[in-house]
Amino acid sequence: MVKLLLPAALLAFVSAPRAADYSFEIPRLECNASIEADGTLLIHYEIEFACRLGAHEIDVVDIGFPTSSYEQGSVAAEVDGHPVTDIRRSTVIPVGVEVHLGNRSIGPGETGVFALSGANPGLVYADPSQPGYASLEFTPTWFDASLLEGETRMTLRIQFPPGADSASTRYHDIPFTGAWRTGEGRIVYEWQTVRRMSSAYMVGVSFPASLISGPIAKRAPIQSTAWAGASDGGGGTGEWMPCCCPAGILSFFAGIIVLAVVQSRNRRLQYIKPSIGVEGVGIKRGLTVPQVCVLLGQKLDRVLMLIIYGLVQKGAAVLDTSSGRPVFTSVQPGMEGLLDYETAILKAVRVGKAGREALDFAQVRDAFVALVRDVENRMKGFSVKETREYYRSIMTEAWKQVGASAGADGIEAVVAEQLPWLLLEDRVEKRLDEFPELRGLVLYPSRLGGSYRPVFSTGQGMSIQQFCSDVASRLESTASSFLGNVDGFTSTVTAVTNPIPVSSHSGTHTGGGCACACACAGCACACAGGGR
């Protein structure tokens, strides 16, 4: 990521005439950040404070915002569900608010839940590492280490703009721990951890820039001052520290870092060895659609999507998505005729568990490792290049068959038969350019009949583009919800099937420079430390 931004500190302090008298714990902190279509970030905090015995009551709380463009009038706060209206611009942190709790102050030995929400426009930036993408990086507010005791159960959720789907959303450096689609169809990434809330926890996301109707800045502003010790695990001095590194030098090295990060990330996703079939000849026929998906090196959530689809069609699994998070209501791993990878996935299912908890992580990983190795073994002696071209031709033929049946009776049966091949690639729009006669085709999923079992309720009539995109998006969202962090999961498979060579070079590294810096795309971040 290549964005350099050192905005006002996203740092929270408990304000007081004598800060040394304050001492508190934060058993729980939840932060929900929603990226709206105009580029505004809607931020909501729910923070449980526990004031320690003998300490000063918590009577004022300062909360920082990412940039000075936050809307003061949008800020609202409450304690234990009771509104607190005395909200002023902070006199302690450069950009943020101070909330005077008044008769809702949290006294020694007491616990209270402080909630705050507000809007901060202009936080979406162009992502230079992915053309056509926008990005945002964000850290929840954090607290003065000298006043804070203990660790916190922290939950951070970022909701993508309307229209985002699981195939087009990305995370940056810290893998998310959960993902799902809301009832309104919006993708959410979630990070859960237990940590000491005395430093930043920077996460980042990227998504298609076309989802943002408002302006998208090409570069975030570089501010000349920042709080020291912003990064997770870093300490802070509480003093203003100038960042004196020339911007050109920082940009140059940031570019190198971005290239290395992108290459490293891509390498972790290469779960199949590039050397398979190099010396082979001829085409390996008879591969199933999920096996072809692996051979093409597609993301593992798409592979799982196709496996789940096949299991539902065979009647070996029943999936319920009515609650918004997918649940297996029944599975039949002992059903005759199942393939090894299908049986392995079904054995990993925890019936009745939702989302990521529905699958045993280790068992699913082992199932994918076995699937990748099985594909590699099947390809021995055959040409990968020729085989891939062969199966791509089958995909094209599937679209041709649908196109040839457009307008005829029984079109739904043709779509049902070819649907796995239609779902194998994420190129519906390009396929419609190849077969324009399909653009006017209206499908009625209820008529698909035959062996087709509807995975989701798809309404009455819809275009084939809507149908394929809807089914694929919902299935991928379901698969992503089961796997959690897809890239992180893939890394665990790659570590077994195509491990990254360990460098034999060793040496020392020393360096110095700015007290802090953020090298990222679309940062809504800060360097911070200290307090009052």
Image (cartoon, rainbow, N blue to C red):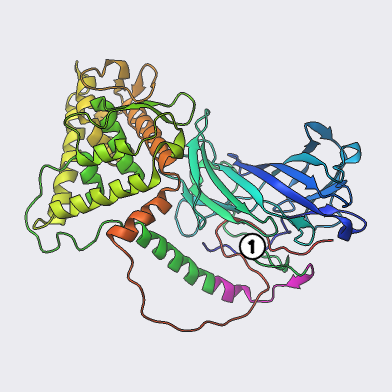
Residue 171 vs residue 327, the one in the foreground: 327
Q: Residue furthest left?
A: 282
Residue 133 vs residue 52, the one in the foreground: 52
Residue 515 lies left or right of residue 58; in this view the side is left
Q: Quadrant of residue 100?
A: top right
The vertical placement of 421 against 283, above or below, is above
Give me the residue at 36% from left, 22% from top: 462
Q: In which quarter of the image is residue 528?
A: bottom right
The image shows residue 457 at horizontal and vertical percentages of 39, 21
**What's the amino acid at mark 1?**
Leu
Give me the residue at 57% from left, 57% from top: 218
Give the magenta-colored segment's residue range.
238-252
Q: Name the residue under label 1.
A: 5
Residue 38 vs residue 245, the one in the foreground: 245
The image shows residue 278 at horizontal and vertical percentages of 14, 63
- Is residue 296 visible in the rendered image? The answer is no
Q: Count up the numbered dots.
A: 1
- What is the secondary structure assignment of the residue under circle 1? loop
User: Does the magenta portion include 251?
Assistant: yes
The image shows residue 17 at horizontal and vertical percentages of 93, 56
The image shows residue 35 at horizontal and vertical percentages of 59, 42
- Is residue 71 visible in the rendered image? The answer is yes
Give me the residue at 53% from left, 29% from top: 184
Give me the residue at 28% from left, 61% from top: 498
User: Does the magenta portion include 129?
Assistant: no
